[in-house]
Structure formats: structure tokens, C-alpha cells
Image (cartoon, rainbow, N blue to C red):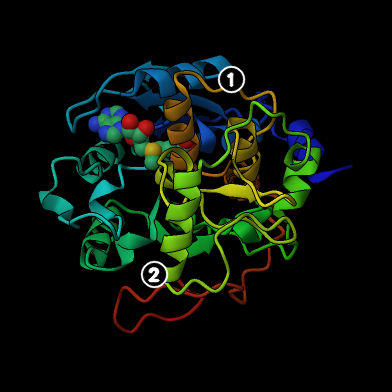
């Protein structure tokens, strides 16, 4: 079976009545992270202020997404697990990195939810930028969570190591009352070609091609940045990171497939979704730009699937993972940090 066929088959929401756990997903977006949990049998409830992202969630997942803006005062129903991707604008390397001072900061909201719900497990993800100027802020957030009685494991993980056809590094922080560790990588590289299958070649002439001015722009961009490998999609490798900007914004960095005749074709919504490991039955809502934004913002569902599977195995007392050696690099946020042990 092809990779994308396996995704279509495996990433299906269902409810495991033996597990019987409810997950609250804060800043749920279109539900990429939630899908990974639902495909393991968790029940989910999402919270998202973007109407179209919330519509996408409600169309595809079993759980309900509540549309509205969260604040530290928000009240939630009872839940066993809290997950989320607090807004990352304050932390992206391109942004101003204002951290706590940024009014768009989602961490006070996330911390308030943990205090209110006292869940068995929590998990949040964020962009790599959180490790630069905001490293001390990440440390502060982790310390606050430890004070609430959680063992916290955290690492910079790459979705490409969890059966996703894309290099996508994210800071993942996992907290639990019973010392759950992040899962070790699966050593199986999935290429962009395996994910796209015939889509890469079966395009029609209505597809969006780069215009002559975009081609000139790309040529200038590549010359100016002394680019040795053009930023076209290579079907024999995993894709580079998909972002809202490089999917929807017409920039030199834009994702595209270079055809044999030299033309460059922009990725379609379905191709971008495949490179993020969304199944084909998953339908995005809103305009094309809004759909690209939902895809670019999402946690790759198959990465989320592996993170959720690991949590489930622990909760069901069935974990067989050997964590005695870390197969990924430990982040150094704290002095005297020991590798592969909790502090
Ligand atoms: C990085 S995206 C989350 C992606 C999601 N985890 C997924 O896997 O699809 C962050 C989301 O937070 C939402 N958001 C930001 N601030 C919010 C707030 N105060 N209340 C509710 N949603 C918010 C944004 O609209 C955006 O969709």
C-alpha cells in the first residue's frame, strides 16, 4: 500500500470506550493535532477563534470545536488531557520576539486551563523560535507547570522522524503525573513523491503556474541568496517545512513543483495537505488562502498520531518503548541538565 493510502486508512477518528479519555485542544486550528488523538480513540473538544478553521474541525472530526476567543478567564468542561498550539507569532524568528509582552501570547491562557482542569496529561507544541530569544520564557513556563505537580519532558522533534514527508521541527512539551516520556523516532523516511503519488504529474492546465514575473523573482532570489539547490520540491526527498507564508504568499520561497518543460507549478491544497499527512477525506473550509493557512499552521496529523499513541500506551499501561537511551537530542534549558532523565 502506498504511504498516502495508509494515511487515508489509519488516520480515522473513532472512540475507544476502554480508553474513555477526553482531550481539550486549545488553539485547535483546523484540528491537525486533534486528528492524531481521535485516530487513537480519544474524544476531543476544540477551542478556536478563527471561524473557518473551526468549521474545518467540525466538518472532519468527531469532537466539537467551540468558536470564540480564549482568555485566561475561559471556563472549560471536565477533561483528562489538555493539548494545544499556543499562538506562535511572538516566537517566530521572523517576528519581533516580544514573548510575555506580546498581547497575542497564548501561554497565560494555556497555564490557566491547566490550573483549572488539573489534567492527567498536557502537551503543547511550538515553533523552534521559542528556543532563541524566548528560551528563558519557555523555561519559566515549564517551571510553572512543574510547580503544579507535573513531570515535564521536552525536546525539539522533527516530524520527518515520525512518518511525515516533511522536515518540520517543533518544540514539544509533554507533562504528566506519571512520568511519560516523548516517543523515540521511527527510522523510516517518507519522500514527497511517496506522499503525492500521481498528483505530482496528474495536474491539469488550469493549475496555477508561476508567471513570468514570478519566475524572474525566483531567479533573482536564488541569485541573491547564492542558492545552490533551488527551492523546488524534490520528489525523492521529504519536503522542506510548509508554512502559511510559503504556501499562500507569492514569494521566492513559495512551494512549487518544477515540471520537465521548466514551468513551475504551485502546490494545490490537496498536495499541501498530503505533505502535512492529512488524509484525502479531510476537507478544508474557507477561501484558498484560508485553507493554506490552516494547513501551514497545523501539527502534521501523523506526527500527532505518534505523540498521542505514546500517551495512550502509557495511560493503558501498555507502553513497550525503551526510553533508556534518547534517540533525539535533549534540549538544554536548565543548567546541570542530565540526558534522558527527568530533572
Ligand atoms: C498554530 S495554530 C494551531 C494549529 C493546530 N494545533 C492544528 O494542529 O491544526 C494556532 C491557532 O490559535 C488560534 N488562536 C490564537 N489566539 C487565540 C485565542 N485567544 N483564542 C482562540 N484561538 C486562538 C489561531 O486562530 C490559530 O488557528
| Residue that mark 1 sits on | 60
- Give the Cα distance between marks 1 and 2: 43 Å
Residue 127 percent coordinates (x, y):
38, 55
261 is higher (above) or lower (below) than 10: below
Residue 56 location, x and y as percent? Answer: 50, 20
Q: Residues within 10 Å of mark 2 (few under 14, many from 20)?
A: few
Ligand 1 position by quadrant: top left
Question: Outermost residue, bottom direction?
Answer: 336
- Kind of element beneath mark 2: helix
Return the residue nearer the eye: 20 or 232.
232
- Taking the spot 63% from the left edge, 25% from the top edge, the residue there is 282
Q: Is residue 8 left or right of residue 41?
A: right
Q: Nearer the viewer, mark 1 or mark 2?
A: 2
Judge: label 2 CB < 8 Å from ligand 1: no
Secondary element at tag 1: helix
Please tell me which residue is depicted at 57% across the width and 33% down the height of the picture: 208
The reply to whether dot 1 and dot 2 touch (C-beta < 8 Å) is no
Give the residue at the far right of this rendering. Answer: 1
Q: Residue at x 36, y 18 (%)?
A: 51
Amino acid at each position: 500500500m502506498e504511504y498516502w493510502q495508509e494515511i487515508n486508512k489509519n488516520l480515522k477518528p473513532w472512540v475507544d470506550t476502554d480508553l474513555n479519555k477526553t482531550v481539550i485542544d486549545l488553539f485547535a486550528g483546523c484540528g491537525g493535532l486533534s486528528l492524531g488523538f481521535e485516530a487513537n480513540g480519544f474524544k476531543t473538544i476544540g477551542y478556536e477563534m478563527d471561524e473557518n478553521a473551526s468549521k474545518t474541525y467540525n466538518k472532519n472530526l468527531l469532537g466539537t470545536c467551540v468558536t470564540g476567543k480564549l482568555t485566561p478567564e475561559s471556563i472549560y468542561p471536565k477533561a483528562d488531557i489538555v493539548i494545544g498550539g499556543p499562538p506562535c507569532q511572538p516566537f517566530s524568528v521572523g517576528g519581533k520576539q516580544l514573548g510575555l509582552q506580546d498581547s497575542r501570547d497564548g501561554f497565560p491562557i494555556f497555564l490557566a486551563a491547566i490550573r483549572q482542569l488539573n489534567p492527567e496529561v498536557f502537551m503543547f507544541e511550538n515553533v523552534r523560535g521559542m528556543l532563541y530569544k524566548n528560551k528563558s520564557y519557555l523555561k519559566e513556563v515549564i517551571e510553572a507547570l512543574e510547580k503544579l505537580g507535573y513531570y515535564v519532558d521536552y525536546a525539539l522533534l522533527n516530524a520527518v522522524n515520525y512518518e511525515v514527508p516533511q522536515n518540520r521541527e517543533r518544540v514539544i512539551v509533554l507533562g504528566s503525573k506519571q512520568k511519560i516520556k516523548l516517543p523515540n523516532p521511527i527510522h523510516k523516511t517518507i519522500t514527497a513523491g511517496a506522499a503525492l503519488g500521481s498528483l505530482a504529474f496528474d495536474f491539469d492546465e488550469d493549475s496555477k503556474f508561476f508567471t513570468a514575473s514570478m519566475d524572474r523573482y525566483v531567479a533573482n532570489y536564488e541569485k541573491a541568496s547564492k542558492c545552490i539547490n533551488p527551492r523546488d520540491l524534490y520528489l525523492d526527498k521529504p519536503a522542506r517545512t510548509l508554512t502559511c507564508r510559503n504556501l499562500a504568499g507569492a514569494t521566492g520561497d513559495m512551494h512549487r513543483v518544477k515540471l520537465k518543460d521548466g514551468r513551475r507549478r504551485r502546490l494545490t491544497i490537496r498536495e499541501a495537505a498530503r505533505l502535512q499527512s492529512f488524509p484525502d477525506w479531510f476537507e478544508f473550509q474557507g477561501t484558498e488562502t484560508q485553507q493554506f493557512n490552516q494547513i501551514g499552521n497545523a501539527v502534521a496529523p501523523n506526527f500527532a498520531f505518534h505523540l498521542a499513541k505514546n500517551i495512550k500506551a502509557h495511560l493503558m499501561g501498555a507502553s513497550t518503548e525503551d526510553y533508556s537511551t534518547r534517540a533525539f537530542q535533549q534540549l538544554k534549558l536548565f543548567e546541570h541538565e542530565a540526558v534522558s532523565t527527568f530533572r
